[in-house]
Amino acid sequence: GSAPGGSGNSSINHNSLIYDPDTERLWHFFRYQGGNKKGYTVELDIEGQTTIASSDIGTPVAWNNNMSGTNSLQVEHIDSCYDTENDRIIIVFTDESDSKKTKAMAANIDTAGDGSKYPSWGSALEIFNDQSAAVQVIFDPVIKKAVVVHSDEDNTKKVRFTVLTINP
Protein backbone atom coordinates (compact mmCIF):
# COMPACT_ATOMS: atom_id res chain seq x y z
CA GLY A 1 0.00 0.00 0.00
CA SER A 2 0.95 3.61 -0.11
CA ALA A 3 1.39 6.18 2.60
CA PRO A 4 -1.84 7.88 3.62
CA GLY A 5 -2.52 11.06 1.71
CA GLY A 6 -4.92 13.88 2.17
CA SER A 7 -6.03 17.17 0.74
CA GLY A 8 -3.29 19.75 1.08
CA ASN A 9 -1.00 17.40 2.96
CA SER A 10 2.41 16.30 1.81
CA SER A 11 4.82 13.88 3.40
CA ILE A 12 4.54 12.58 6.92
CA ASN A 13 7.03 12.48 9.76
CA HIS A 14 7.27 11.37 13.38
CA ASN A 15 5.88 7.87 12.74
CA SER A 16 4.88 5.07 15.06
CA LEU A 17 3.20 1.77 14.23
CA ILE A 18 1.64 -0.78 16.60
CA TYR A 19 -0.33 -3.99 16.35
CA ASP A 20 -3.56 -4.35 18.34
CA PRO A 21 -4.07 -8.08 19.03
CA ASP A 22 -7.67 -7.58 20.14
CA THR A 23 -8.91 -5.98 16.91
CA GLU A 24 -6.21 -7.58 14.70
CA ARG A 25 -5.38 -4.18 13.26
CA LEU A 26 -2.27 -2.12 12.76
CA TRP A 27 -2.49 1.49 13.87
CA HIS A 28 -0.23 4.12 12.31
CA PHE A 29 0.35 7.36 14.23
CA PHE A 30 2.06 10.29 12.53
CA ARG A 31 2.21 14.01 11.86
CA TYR A 32 2.00 15.60 8.43
CA GLN A 33 5.16 17.55 7.64
CA GLY A 34 4.24 21.21 7.80
CA GLY A 35 0.61 22.18 8.14
CA ASN A 36 -1.22 22.06 11.43
CA LYS A 37 1.17 19.67 13.24
CA LYS A 38 -1.73 17.61 14.61
CA GLY A 39 -1.34 13.94 15.36
CA TYR A 40 -3.15 11.57 13.00
CA THR A 41 -4.20 7.93 13.22
CA VAL A 42 -4.75 5.50 10.36
CA GLU A 43 -6.29 2.05 10.78
CA LEU A 44 -4.77 -0.74 8.67
CA ASP A 45 -7.10 -3.74 8.46
CA ILE A 46 -4.77 -6.73 8.02
CA GLU A 47 -6.86 -9.54 9.49
CA GLY A 48 -5.92 -12.79 7.74
CA GLN A 49 -3.63 -11.06 5.22
CA THR A 50 0.06 -11.21 4.42
CA THR A 51 0.19 -7.97 2.40
CA ILE A 52 -1.30 -4.51 2.81
CA ALA A 53 -3.21 -3.12 -0.18
CA SER A 54 -4.22 0.52 -0.50
CA SER A 55 -7.83 -0.55 0.17
CA ASP A 56 -6.71 -1.80 3.61
CA ILE A 57 -5.51 1.67 4.63
CA GLY A 58 -8.11 3.78 6.40
CA THR A 59 -8.65 7.52 6.28
CA PRO A 60 -6.32 9.65 8.43
CA VAL A 61 -8.15 11.04 11.46
CA ALA A 62 -6.68 13.71 13.73
CA TRP A 63 -6.49 12.26 17.22
CA ASN A 64 -6.35 15.71 18.73
CA ASN A 65 -8.90 17.21 16.33
CA ASN A 66 -11.27 18.22 19.12
CA MET A 67 -8.59 20.30 20.83
CA SER A 68 -8.15 23.96 20.02
CA GLY A 69 -6.73 27.14 21.49
CA THR A 70 -4.67 26.47 24.60
CA ASN A 71 -5.60 22.76 24.40
CA SER A 72 -4.26 22.39 20.85
CA LEU A 73 -1.37 19.93 20.59
CA GLN A 74 1.44 20.26 18.06
CA VAL A 75 2.78 16.74 17.93
CA GLU A 76 6.41 15.76 17.52
CA HIS A 77 8.51 12.66 18.38
CA ILE A 78 5.63 10.11 18.50
CA ASP A 79 5.88 6.57 19.86
CA SER A 80 3.20 4.06 20.81
CA CYS A 81 2.57 0.72 22.47
CA TYR A 82 -0.34 -1.58 23.17
CA ASP A 83 -1.40 -2.02 26.79
CA THR A 84 -2.43 -5.70 26.95
CA GLU A 85 -3.59 -5.37 30.56
CA ASN A 86 -6.24 -2.74 29.75
CA ASP A 87 -6.72 -3.47 26.00
CA ARG A 88 -5.84 0.03 24.84
CA ILE A 89 -3.35 2.06 22.85
CA ILE A 90 -0.89 4.38 24.55
CA ILE A 91 0.96 7.10 22.67
CA VAL A 92 3.69 9.42 23.93
CA PHE A 93 4.89 12.51 22.13
CA THR A 94 6.43 15.91 22.61
CA ASP A 95 4.14 18.92 22.27
CA GLU A 96 5.69 21.79 20.28
CA SER A 97 2.93 24.15 21.41
CA ASP A 98 3.88 23.56 25.06
CA SER A 99 7.70 23.91 25.15
CA LYS A 100 8.17 20.36 23.77
CA LYS A 101 7.00 18.78 27.03
CA THR A 102 6.50 15.00 26.99
CA LYS A 103 2.84 13.98 27.06
CA ALA A 104 0.86 10.76 26.83
CA MET A 105 -2.64 9.75 25.79
CA ALA A 106 -4.55 6.48 26.01
CA ALA A 107 -7.34 5.24 23.74
CA ASN A 108 -9.84 2.44 23.84
CA ILE A 109 -10.80 0.96 20.46
CA ASP A 110 -14.45 1.40 19.50
CA THR A 111 -16.44 0.11 16.53
CA ALA A 112 -18.30 2.44 14.14
CA GLY A 113 -21.64 1.59 12.55
CA ASP A 114 -19.91 0.42 9.35
CA GLY A 115 -17.75 -2.03 11.32
CA SER A 116 -14.56 0.03 11.10
CA LYS A 117 -12.53 0.55 14.26
CA TYR A 118 -11.40 3.83 15.74
CA PRO A 119 -9.52 4.94 18.85
CA SER A 120 -11.48 6.91 21.44
CA TRP A 121 -8.85 9.13 23.04
CA GLY A 122 -8.67 10.39 26.60
CA SER A 123 -7.03 13.65 27.64
CA ALA A 124 -3.34 14.40 27.23
CA LEU A 125 -1.30 13.86 30.39
CA GLU A 126 1.94 15.78 30.92
CA ILE A 127 4.59 13.33 32.08
CA PHE A 128 7.70 15.51 31.90
CA ASN A 129 7.62 19.30 32.17
CA ASP A 130 10.95 20.14 30.51
CA GLN A 131 11.80 20.12 26.81
CA SER A 132 12.17 16.53 25.57
CA ALA A 133 13.06 14.61 22.44
CA ALA A 134 13.48 11.03 21.28
CA VAL A 135 10.55 9.60 23.25
CA GLN A 136 9.91 5.86 23.35
CA VAL A 137 7.33 3.75 25.19
CA ILE A 138 6.87 0.04 25.84
CA PHE A 139 4.28 -1.87 27.83
CA ASP A 140 5.82 -4.05 30.53
CA PRO A 141 3.50 -7.02 31.19
CA VAL A 142 5.26 -7.86 34.47
CA ILE A 143 4.57 -4.53 36.19
CA LYS A 144 1.44 -3.96 34.01
CA LYS A 145 2.40 -0.40 33.14
CA ALA A 146 3.90 1.53 30.25
CA VAL A 147 7.49 2.71 30.65
CA VAL A 148 8.64 5.87 28.85
CA VAL A 149 12.20 6.88 28.03
CA HIS A 150 13.06 10.33 26.71
CA SER A 151 15.93 12.77 26.66
CA ASP A 152 15.84 15.92 28.76
CA GLU A 153 16.73 18.57 26.19
CA ASP A 154 16.68 21.60 28.49
CA ASN A 155 19.85 21.58 30.55
CA THR A 156 21.17 18.19 31.43
CA LYS A 157 20.68 16.22 28.17
CA LYS A 158 20.16 13.19 30.41
CA VAL A 159 18.01 10.20 29.63
CA ARG A 160 14.88 10.08 31.78
CA PHE A 161 12.60 7.11 32.56
CA THR A 162 8.98 7.36 33.67
CA VAL A 163 6.64 4.56 34.74
CA LEU A 164 3.34 5.75 33.32
CA THR A 165 -0.01 5.62 35.08
CA ILE A 166 -2.66 6.91 32.67
CA ASN A 167 -6.41 6.63 32.61
CA PRO A 168 -8.21 6.16 29.28
Image (cartoon, helix red, strand yellow):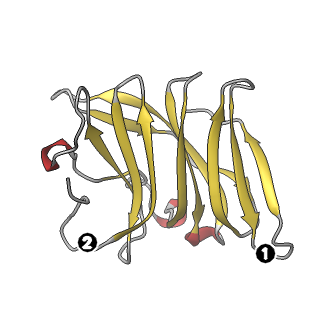
**Residue at position x 43%, y 54% in the image:** 64
Q: Dot 1, how many residues are within 10 Å of its Cα: few (below 14), some (14-19), or many (20+)?
A: few
Q: Which mark is residue 154?
A: 1
Residue 93 is situated, as x and y percent measured from the top left of the image, at 57, 57
**Residue at position x 38%, y 78% in the image:** 34
Between 61 and 152, the residue placed more toward the observer is 152
Q: Dot 2, how many residues are within 10 Å of its Cα: few (below 14), some (14-19), or many (20+)?
A: few
**Given the current orientation, which residue lies at the most extreme front position?**
50
Residue 84 is situated, as x and y percent measured from the top left of the image, at 55, 24
Is residue 138 toward the left or the right of residue 1 in the image? right
Calculate the distance from the C-alpha at mark 2 to the C-alpha at mark 1: 31 Å
Q: Amino acid at mark 2?
A: Asn
Whether 145 is drawn above or below 39: the answer is above
Q: Secondary structure at mark 1?
A: loop
The residue that label 2 is drawn on is 9
**Given the current orientation, which residue lies at the most extreme right position?**
156
Whether 96 is drawn above or below 29: the answer is below
Whether 28 is drawn above or below 140: the answer is below
Residue 49 is situated, as x and y percent measured from the top left of the image, at 22, 32
Question: What is the quadrant of residue 90 in the picture?
Answer: top right
Q: Earlier in the sequence, mark 2 or mark 1?
A: 2
Between 160 and 8, the residue placed more toward the observer is 160
**Residue at position x 72%, y 53% in the image:** 149
Is residue 67 toward the left or the right of residue 43 in the image? right
